[in-house]
């Protein structure tokens, strides 16, 4: 009897492709079954595919059918995993294979011959993965009553449940995660727990802590910074059920976990959980969906939850768990103050109150943290004679001045060039950096306190092949007390338990406060609460000073009270009145072209396509406009916003409308993409 396989491959089609299953792939040693990897011909190429169905008949004519070329020797992917990928493909309106195949490690997506060559080269150049250094077992600390209540509620859930763990910074959310995982493994030693964090630089410290806390269990990390062989080996350990605790960044939400029993998303509000390359997806949202498919609990943790998650908790869809006390005893919460720059003008980026606070901190032999979310020496280089500015030749943006290396660099497209010896327009040699970057602040601090030990952690100081190791070494130095003042960008605000920091200084908070993005206040509040939470974690008296020209802004008043619920209530009221998420649902069609006129014309053509919506329908297509950064990497960019009050209405329109958009072809457009639930418009 003939047998046919439905296979998904990494091509932009929503359905699976039919292939004939020959007799040799029906035996027990290399059996074609649902979830297995295979090699199939696609056009003139051969690709890795995933078998998602088997049947005894095909709708295609026999002459059009081609055969499976090989079945790869790997345990099949589970039905739950396939269902997650299919849901993601349908929700984000991409091909099933476009979502499923990129979810596999790159080494497993290569054809067998190429895979062997790549694996051999990887072993030769990198060496085999070294065994992790031994660590001393960690003794679980005594838990407070509110932590114990949270763990009890989570571990008593016997089916799908979404928990929003809302805890102030330093309240011990991580201990709740670890306590819940510990209970899970006590009940079932083969169970698996997935712990997602927003950034790669958070994984080394947490990985070591997990190994110390769970010495008898397999603990692995999954993220893009791993060497190809190491990433594939870790993924296979999880796939085969030999790793019980899987720590990873957003792509780990697609890890194959046959015994998954719990998911944790730490810092769930973080924008890093939204992917923007390939198929844009939200790892946080897919974590909730995966928990629903697997009928298991999912914990979303944050001191400043996203307004979407907070609204879900207010409506009762998520169970709200509160941690309102700091884990440290004997100390008070940090005092948060604003420094009005109109009253205290900054000198070299630092106002008098900040300089005094840093001096007092050094006198007490404590640590200080200076946060500035702008790397480089200065945001722009300026000619004092003719007002020439260092614009990026490829973007509608300025190229930042990096004094280290004497380079101009665009932080959007990556363009860089040597700093000119003279103004390109008038020849004047008096070129000045305007504004402050982390390099400039580091230089100012070194000038003010030449004997202090000052370190800088940002993308520039940790880039390159060994960047992750440099970041780990820098953070270890801070924890060991070998740094007096730490200067850094957002890299230093998330998840780090700096026990000796008693003073935090925030520079240039106003840049995000006045941004056009309606999510800017939410993101600013979150990052300020995060960086404030680095102070006083050992119970010592601590201060947070924020330089601003808008000291009376309501955001700073709520921040001083450390009252997220009041801030969220005000923001949600504004969002509801303005018909913005989470009270409406959005998708964004973007395109790039040679000129902005071409991009906008393509979008107008798309907007004129029939949507199939009944007269008086509530889904709306807005007029096409240039993107906020209209030109990037020598490409012009436009966008078209689609909005609906109900999620179902939005997806119904996209399902009818996007096939027509695809049928238009390129027509001079370099590329276009659809993003559901965009984070920036």
Image: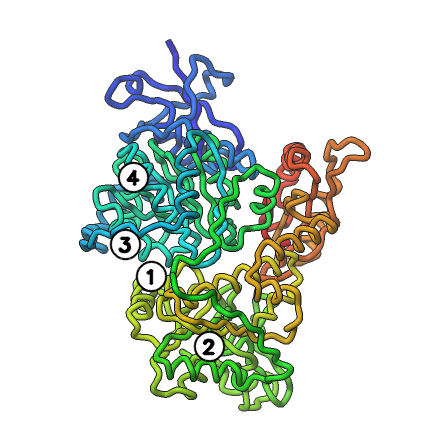
Do the residues under discs 3 and 2 have CB atoms within 8 angstroms?
no
In this rendered view, identify the residue nearer to me: 655 or 491.
491
Nearest-to-viewer mark from 1 and 4: 4
Horizontal and vertical percent position of residue 313:
57, 42
Q: From the image, tell me which residue sits under label 1.
A: 468
Which quadrant holds the N terminus? top left
**Residue 125 seen in render:** yes
Q: Earlier in the sequence, mark 1 or mark 3?
A: 3
Q: Is residue 593 above or below residue 295?
A: below
**Residue 463 x %, y %:** 38, 65
Q: Earlier in the sequence, mark 4 or mark 2?
A: 4
Question: CA–CA distance between discs 3 and 2?
Answer: 34 Å
Residue identifier under label 2: 402
Disc 3 from disc 4: Cα separation: 15 Å
User: Which residue ends up furthest to the top in the rendered image?
Assistant: 1
Q: Which mark is residue 244?
A: 4
Q: Which residue is mark 3?
A: 208
């Amino acid at each position: 009897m003939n047998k046919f396989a439905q296979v998904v491959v990494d091509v932009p089609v929503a359905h699976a492709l039919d292939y004939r299953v020959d007799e040799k792939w029906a035996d027990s040693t290399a059996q074609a079954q649902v979830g297995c990897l295979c090699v199939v011909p696609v056009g003139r190429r051969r690709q890795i595919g995933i078998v998602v169905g088997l049947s005894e008949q095909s709708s295609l004519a026999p002459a059009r059918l081609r055969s499976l070329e090989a079945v790869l020797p790997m345990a099949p992917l589970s039905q739950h995993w396939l269902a997650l990928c299919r849901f993601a493909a349908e929700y984000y309106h991409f091909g099933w294979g476009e979502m499923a195949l990129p979810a596999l490690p790159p080494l497993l997506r290569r054809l067998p011959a190429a895979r062997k060559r790549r694996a051999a080269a990887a072993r030769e150049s990198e060496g085999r993965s070294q065994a992790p250094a031994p660590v001393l077992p960690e003794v679980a600390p005594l838990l407070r009553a509110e932590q114990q209540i949270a763990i009890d509620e989570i571990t008593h859930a016997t089916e799908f449940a979404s928990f929003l763990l809302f805890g102030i910074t330093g309240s011990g959310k991580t201990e709740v995660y670890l306590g819940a995982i510990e209970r899970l493994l006590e009940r079932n030693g083969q169970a698996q727990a997935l712990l997602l964090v927003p950034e790669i630089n958070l994984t080394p410290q947490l990985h070591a802590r997990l190994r110390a806390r769970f010495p008898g269990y397999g603990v692995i990390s999954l993220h893009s910074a791993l060497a190809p062989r190491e990433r594939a080996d870790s993924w296979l350990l999880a796939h085969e059920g030999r790793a019980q605790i899987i720590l990873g960044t957003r792509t780990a939400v697609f890890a194959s976990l046959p015994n998954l029993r719990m998911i944790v998303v730490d810092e769930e509000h973080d924008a890093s959980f939204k992917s923007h390359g390939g198929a844009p997806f939200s790892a946080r949202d897919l974590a909730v969906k995966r928990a629903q498919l697997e009928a298991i609990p999912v914990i979303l943790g944050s001191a400043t939850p996203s307004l979407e998650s907070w609204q879900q908790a207010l409506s009762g869809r998520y169970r709200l768990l509160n941690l309102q006390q700091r884990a440290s005893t004997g100390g008070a919460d940090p005092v948060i103050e604003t420094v009005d720059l109109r009253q205290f003008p900054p000198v070299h980026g630092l106002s008098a109150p900040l300089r005094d606070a840093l001096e007092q901190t050094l006198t007490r032999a404590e640590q200080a943290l200076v946060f500035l979310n702008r790397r480089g020496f200065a945001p722009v280089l300026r000619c004092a004679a003719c007002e020439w500015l260092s614009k990026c030749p490829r973007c509608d943006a300025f190229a930042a001045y990096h004094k280290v290396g004497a380079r101009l660099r665009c932080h959007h497209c990556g363009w860089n060039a040597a700093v000119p010896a003279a103004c390109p327009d008038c020849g004047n040699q008096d070129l000045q950096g305007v504004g402050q970057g982390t390099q400039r602040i580091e230089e100012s601090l070194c000038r003010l306190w030449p004997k202090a030990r000052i370190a800088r952690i940002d993308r520039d100081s940790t880039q390159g092949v060994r960047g992750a190791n440099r970041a780990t070494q820098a953070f270890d130095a801070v924890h060991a007390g070998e740094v007096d003042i730490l200067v850094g960008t957002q890299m230093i605000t998330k998840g780090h338990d700096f026990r000796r920091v008693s003073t935090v200084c925030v520079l240039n908070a106003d840049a995000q406060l006045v941004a056009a993005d309606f999510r800017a206040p939410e993101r600013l509040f979150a990052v300020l609460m995060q960086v404030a939470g680095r102070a006083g974690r050992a119970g010592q008296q601590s201060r947070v000073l924020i330089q601003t020209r808008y000291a009376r802004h309501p955001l700073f008043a709520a921040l001083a009270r450390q009252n997220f619920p009041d801030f969220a209530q005000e923001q949600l009221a504004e969002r509801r009145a303005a018909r913005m998420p989470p009270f409406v649902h959005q998708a964004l069609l973007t395109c790039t072209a040679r000129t902005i006129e071409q991009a906008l014309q393509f979008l107008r053509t798309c907007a004129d396509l029939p949507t199939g919506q009944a007269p008086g329908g509530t889904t709306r297509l807005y007029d096409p406009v240039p993107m906020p950064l209209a030109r990037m990497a020598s490409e012009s960019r436009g966008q078209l916003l689609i909005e609906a009050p109900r999620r179902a209405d939005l997806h119904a329109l996209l399902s009818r409308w996007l096939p027509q958009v695809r049928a238009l072809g390129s027509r001079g457009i370099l590329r276009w993409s659809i993003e559901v639930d965009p984070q920036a418009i």
